[in-house]
Image (tube, rainbow, N blue to C red):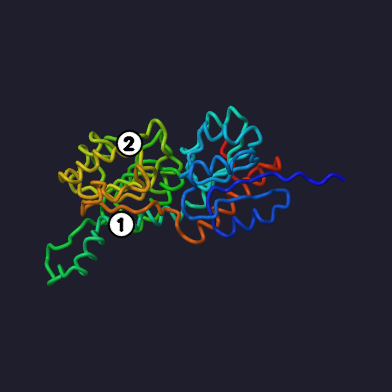
Amino acid sequence: MRPLRLMKVFVTRRIPPEGRAALARATDCEVEDWDSDEPIPDKELERGVAGAHGLLCLLSDRIDKRLLDAAGTNLKVISTLSVGVDHLALDEIKKRGIRVGYTPDVLTDATAELAVSLLLTTSRRLPEAIAEVKNGGWTSWKPLWMCGYGLTQSTVGIIGLGRIGQAIARRLKPFGVHRFLYTGRQPRPQEAAEFQAAFVSAPQLAAESDFIIVACSLTPATKGLCNKGFFQQMKKTAVFVNISRGDVVDQEDLYQALASGQIAAAGLDVTTPEPLPASHPLLTLKNCVILPHIGSATHGTRNTMSLLAANNLLAGLRGEPMPSEFKL
């Protein structure tokens, strides 16, 4: 009897233990990974993917035509450890008949929790307050010192009322939000009913919201959506939060809006590029809180994501239905 030919799998980073264990148990696969928390160099990625049947990648890995050419014709499955797929050359992948797995739903709650945390951190000026305690700026109780903005009786605008947008609204509702607005490609009356959210245009959402949360996918239509014109329509007391993708925001326009007092504050979990250079002008502003893209960063969520990504990959290689396949 001829021995079973193993399928080659390449993993572009050290992934959480549950996913690694699932791949290790796959007796029909030969798994190689870039065993580091740091990004794989381009040359190593090209070498590793050459001849691979399956690729497990991260959102920071650019899977473009050049890399697909380096992989060769064996490549049948790409599984990404993310819900976003804007790092994948989908047209080229579809042309080659490659299946794609991704990790929706499992990171919804963690990302929504982070969005609320970032909104509160930004609106109540927590980084500034902590710094004042440490640098001696806290001298006495002062009636107007460190005042921020509260959610009670506010209007919250959500750009993108998908799974994460809904989860954010669900968590904000008990804070006493008076009104929810949302915008997107089309009205979503069934989803919006839970929050009595009104579907409005992006300009109206900008003009009427006290807090704006960006939770949409990055598409050609949303790239640069939040620009100078958008910020000019916002209230001077409004707080802007982005947990989607950095390219939805024109960061130069955001800097000008914050530095000039056009808007009150911004909290970002995503930027362009990532990581954001330490010399970036946004990092000089007290009214801008920037996190290193940690929306899904809980131990449980990252383990669940890694297991789903591994199971997507293995199912695809075996010609079986994936638990979560991105349909091309």
Residue 144 higher or lower than 203, as above or below: below
Measured as percent of width and height from the top left, residue 192 is found at 41, 43
Q: Are marks 2 and 1 in contact (CB under 8 Å)?
A: no
**Foreground of the two, 186 or 93:** 93
- Inter-mark Cα distance, 2 to 1: 21 Å
Residue type pointed to by label 1: Gly
Circle 1 packing at 10 Å, graded few (<14), some (14-19), many (20+), is few
Measured as percent of width and height from the top left, residue 308 is found at 59, 51
Quadrant in which residue 318 is drawn: top right
The residue located at (39%, 51%) in the rendering is 293
The residue located at (23%, 33%) in the rendering is 229
The residue located at (73%, 52%) in the rendering is 27
The reply, left or right, for residue 83 in relation to residue 246 is right
Circle 2 packing at 10 Å, graded few (<14), some (14-19), many (20+), is some
Residue at mark 1? 176
Which disc is residue 200 wearing?
2
Badge 1 marks a residue whose secondary structure is loop
The reply, left or right, for residue 73 in relation to residue 112 is right
Q: Earlier in the sequence, mark 2 or mark 1?
A: 1
Residue type pointed to by label 2: Val
Question: Hey, which residue is sitting farthest bottom in the picture?
Answer: 140
User: Which quadrant would the C terminus be assigned to in this image?
Assistant: top right
Badge 2 marks a residue whose secondary structure is loop
Quadrant in which residue 257 is drawn: top left
